[in-house]
Each structure stands twice: as structure tokens, then as C-alpha cells.
Amino acid sequence: MSTEKYEQTINIDRMEQTVSLFGSFDENIRMLEKEYAVDIVNRGGALKICGEPEAVSKAAKAVEGLMMLLNKGEALTEQNVRYCISLVNEGNDDKLPAIASDCICITTAGKPVKPKTLGQKKYIDLINKNTIVFGVGPAGTGKTYLAVAMAVKAFRAKEVNRIILTRPAVEAGEKLGFLPGDLQQKVDPYLRPLYDALFEMLGADNFQKYQEKGNIEVAPLAYMRGRTLDDSFIILDEAQNTTPEQMKMFLTRLGFNSKIVVTGDVTQIDLPDGKKSGLKEAVRILKNIEDIETVRFTEKDVVRHRLVQDIIRAYEKNDKNR
């Protein structure tokens, strides 16, 4: 194997770009050095990358991709540096501009909500273009969070006058009847993740105000029966735990000028043995109907801690081996 070293220089226009690119304690550059077994040094406004020719070429592509994200106003995080590396390694670095996307909405803390992966970008585009979208994939891929952001955006733009969030209240080892409180208090723990996302994007006071006026409704799936939902953005979360009958009931609530987003993870079905998942069946039955689309997320779309990706991969490998 050749030990010949190769060097490539990348010019950087502004000092602040170098600071952002390197990250605190040079963590971003260390990640690239470790991934590609190269040395990267900053010399007078230029980055010098030294190592095996192919490794240097990939590292340079990753640096250029990260510079492009910085130029588009993106902040570099461990997640998007890792994602940039994975796109370069797959030969998909030309798709990097797609993840420097427009902001969907701003949280009350001033944080922009944007898609962070190609899977998330596709999801947002399909929600914009279609009436019903299924988002299927593992935990941490932003399925629910981005759907809530899209609902808030549509509500603020007065495209809909109501946001409805719902989940099947599957009892994960607990019986609702034994929990203290009235029905609302009993089902609230199931709906907590939906409340959390709405609080973050609207603020607790606004949420309360809209909920009292009937503009926002967070309710278990059973409450949807017998209704027609017009002018609404409706999100069904944890849909893997619906039965086929519940899913059909829910989808046929669709009214005029409404959108439905259905999210779920088919590897986490908590239904009793022998019960089919309504999500699996709906995706299969409705796959060729115009204005209905499905996005399948993978572990590459996970935007939580790096270990979440590793955990999902390990479980998938175990399932295949079995």
C-alpha cells in the first residue's frame, strides 16, 4: 500500500468562517480528521489537508460542504457534520445544498425549525404538495416535530383555522381505569409529546388561548369518531398502534381544505398479539392513490444523539439475524 502523502489547500475568505468551521475545541475538524485519517491545519486563511489522496479528496468535499452550509447561514452541529460526512462517503455530496433549507417556523426561544436531512426535506416537500402524508420510521427522525411545525406554519398563514393532534391511547402495560383523575387527566400523559412540541412553537400562553377558542385540539383518537374535519391540519401520531378499523375511521374524517399527516414507527407496535397495525395496512392499500404519499425515514435521518443511530442499527441487525 502506498505511503505517499497528498496535500490539498482550501482558501477561506473570512476569519469567522474558520472559527465556525473548526467548532469549539476544534471538534468539527477533529471529526473529519478521525473519519478520513488526515491532518487538517489552518495556515494564513487557508486549510491544508494532508493524507492519502482519496481520503484528502473526501475530506476536502466534506469541508466544502460545511463551508456551503455556513455560507447559507446554518450553524454547524455534531449532527450536520456527521450527516455531511455520510453524504460524502455515499457519493451524494452534490445533494448537500438541499439540507440548507428554508425555515419552517421559529420557536418561542428564537430557534429556527428546519429539515436537517434529505429524508426530512422530502417529508416537508411532500406535506406541502399533498393532502395526506404518511411519515414512517424510527424514533428521533423528527416525524412528529416537523409535522407540528408545518401545522403551526399553516395556522399562522391562515391556510387552516384549526390544528388537531391525536394519538391512539394504547395502554403500554398500564390500564387507564386504574390511573387517577378524570378522562382528560388520564389521556394527557399519552399526548404529552404533542403538547411539548406545540408549547415550544407557540408558547404556553398562546397554546392555552388557542385551545380555549377551539383552534387547537389535542385528543385521543377515539374522540375523532363521527366527525368531519374541515379547514384543519390534523396529525395522527404513533399510528402504528391503530387497528385497521381505527385508521380507516380516522382517514375518512378528512374534510374540505384539510391536511392529514400520519406518523409512526412500525418496529414499535404495542397492539395485542394477533392485531394488525392500521399504519402498515394503510400504507400498503393507499400507495397508488394520487395526493397521498409516504416518506420512509431511516437511521440516517435520526437527529438525536449519535448513539440513537447506533442503537437503531444494532436492533435492525439483530432482527435480520433472527
Image (spheres, grey):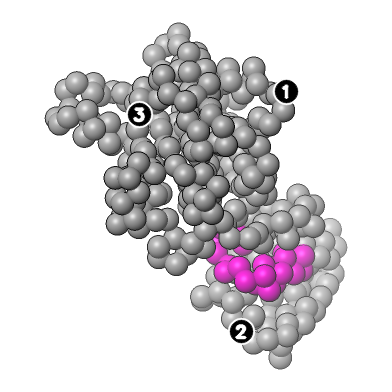
Q: Which residue is mark 2?
A: 16
Q: Which residue is mark 1?
A: 288
Where residue 13 sits, quadrant-wise, is bottom right
Q: Is residue 311 visible?
A: no
Q: Earlier in the sequence, mark 1 or mark 2?
A: 2
Place of residue 161 in the rendered image (x, y in percent of width and height, measured from the top left) = 47, 44
- At a point 27% along the width and 31% down the height, the residue shown is 187
Q: Is residue 120 magenta?
A: no
Place of residue 1 in the rendered image (x, y in percent of width and height, measured from the top left) = 84, 58
- At a point 61% along the width and 39% down the height, the residue shown is 297
Place of residue 91 in the rendered image (x, y in percent of width and height, measured from the top left) = 79, 52
Question: Are dots 1 and 2 in contact, CB under 8 Å?
Answer: no
Where residue 295 sits, quadrant-wise, is top right
Which residue is more in the foreground, 145 or 50?
145
Q: Classify mark 2: residues with Cα within 10 Å, few (<14), some (14-19) or many (20+).
A: few
Tag 3 secondary structure: strand
- On residue 220, which mark appears? 3
> Looking at the image, is mark 2 or mark 3 nearer the viewer?
3
**As displayed, is residue 13 above or below residue 92?**
below
Q: Is residue 197 left or right of residue 150?
A: left
Which residue is more in the foreground, 227 or 309?
227
> Looking at the image, is mark 1 or mark 2 nearer the viewer?
1
Q: Earlier in the sequence, mark 2 or mark 3?
A: 2
**As displayed, is residue 251 above or below residue 200?**
above
Q: Which region of the structure is painted magenta?
A: 59-81
Residue type at mark 3: give it: Pro
Q: Is residue 64 magenta?
A: yes
